[in-house]
Amino acid sequence: MVKDSPSHSATRIEKDALGEVSVPAAHLWGAQTQRSIENFPIGVDGFRWGRPVIRAFGVLKKAAATANGELGELAHDKVALVSRAAQEVIDGTLDAEFPLVVFQTGSGTQSNMNANEVIANRAIQLAGGVVGSKKPVHPNDDVNRGQSSNDTFPAVMHIATVDELDTHLLPALERLRTTLDAKAQAFDDVVMIGRTHLQDATPVTLGQVISGWVAQLDDARAALLFARQGLLPLALGGTAVGTGLNAHPSFGERVAAAIARETGVPFVSAANKFAALSAHDAIVNVSAMLRTLAGALMKIANDVRWHASGPRAGLGEITIPDNEPGSSIMPGKINPTQCEALTMVAVRVFGNDTAVAFGGTQGNFQLNVYKPVMLHGVLESIELLGDAMTSFDERCAQGIEPDLARIRENVERSLMLVTALNPHIGYENAAKIALAAHRGNLSLRDAALQLQLVSADDFDRWVDAAAMTRPGSG
């Protein structure tokens, strides 16, 4: 088992084009990975590649070996060795061998070479050879055959992003949506006061309010699924600049098919490799849709905490779970912390999207060199949104309940029920009633009768809060 300690005292010498490099003997990475460790001590903790990227590299390298074997470009014994080593990368056995951070060369070359070196050295181990000897498996000539970092890293960006969308974000989104949809149906007959401009408006039901949240989540999900489609074309086969130099003419199609078989996702070879290397519009689009989802979640979380504000001096129309004490000085105070956490995640996603969008504009000639920071931003947004939606669902949304007494009180005191009189007595007479009620601290009914603009029977028949939540007039 490879030890998880880059500072292990024993070392070995590996070589690259620039000469010899001392590498920790306990690890499988090689000279170029070690140079990256030493040359990019930026961020480090919190900015190393995680499981999604490492797994994507394993998937890619296994598929590349398979494709090269099918095309007669790689001997079958090497295909078997590379595939076995790459499978260990896929399975997570070798995660400790991927120490590099996001901030490196903008093409992701060091990360690609990290994967090549680790898989080559592990394959050498499996063959009973000497780690670092590059025999019988070479990191460049065999593991990286038919590839360039310029087309492998974009492919990893797509593979990792699709995997995280499918396994982490979309399931969390669906669970929250299911919870809120059930609440919308359960509270469909709870009539409450609507609000526009933060001021009282005509009545709605709590179910209608929550149905709006559900619709936002549905729209965000549809947009994400559409953006996900743009990730299915892969840059592999373009090699350095998009021409496919040093790759078999059929490599792009074969490796995409192998990746599709490995992942169960219908990846294909990108029709235009020049765009696939120099522009990452698909990643930009996914980030934009994550921002849209974050905006919807911001709205939902803010609505929840406004409706739950109080408990005595706020709106107090719904209750949410009491999860923890809210103040170090005010005894008994409970805060809407899940709402606050979700809105902070939204802010972080907005920031990530700004970075991704800017990075997407930096494709100069045949290469965009902001790839790692773009991938990191998208994956962090996916992780945070997935985690935050799950937490908000379990610790807040599932516990939302109406305070019926408070809701009834607010409806009965609302001046905007007067809108139901518009079709019967006209807007200006209705406005006189509302203003008289407000200035005289009267109920609408009392003001209407006092002004002799409406009879008691007509008022009671026309001003029906529940009826006002449906189309038509009284």
Image (spheres, rainbow, N blue to C red):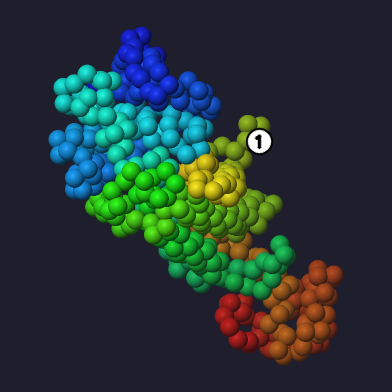
43 displayed left or right of 89: right
Give the class, few, some or many, for how many residues have Cα within 10 Å of label 1's Cα (few <14, many ≥20). Answer: few
Badge 1 amino acid = Met
Q: In which quarter of the image is the N terminus?
A: top left
In the image, residue 188 above or below residue 387: below
Q: Report which residue position mark 1 lands on.
A: 330
Left or right, 196 with respect to 112, comes to right
Please give the name of the residue rendered at 41% of the width and 33% of the height, measured from the top-left corner: 111
- Please give the name of the residue rendered at 85% of the width and 70% of the height, measured from the top-left corner: 439
Q: Toward the viewer: 439 or 101? A: 101
- In x, y percent, where is residue 452? 81, 87
Question: Residue 248, image x and y in percent?
Answer: 28, 48
Q: Which residue is drawn at 63% across and 73% down?
A: 203
Between 462 and 187, the one nearer to me in the picture: 187
Q: Where is residue 387 in the image (x, y as percent from the top left)?
A: 45, 45
Residue furthest to the top in view is 9
**In the rendered image, is residue 191 in sight?**
yes
Who's the residue at 61% across and 40% down the image?
333
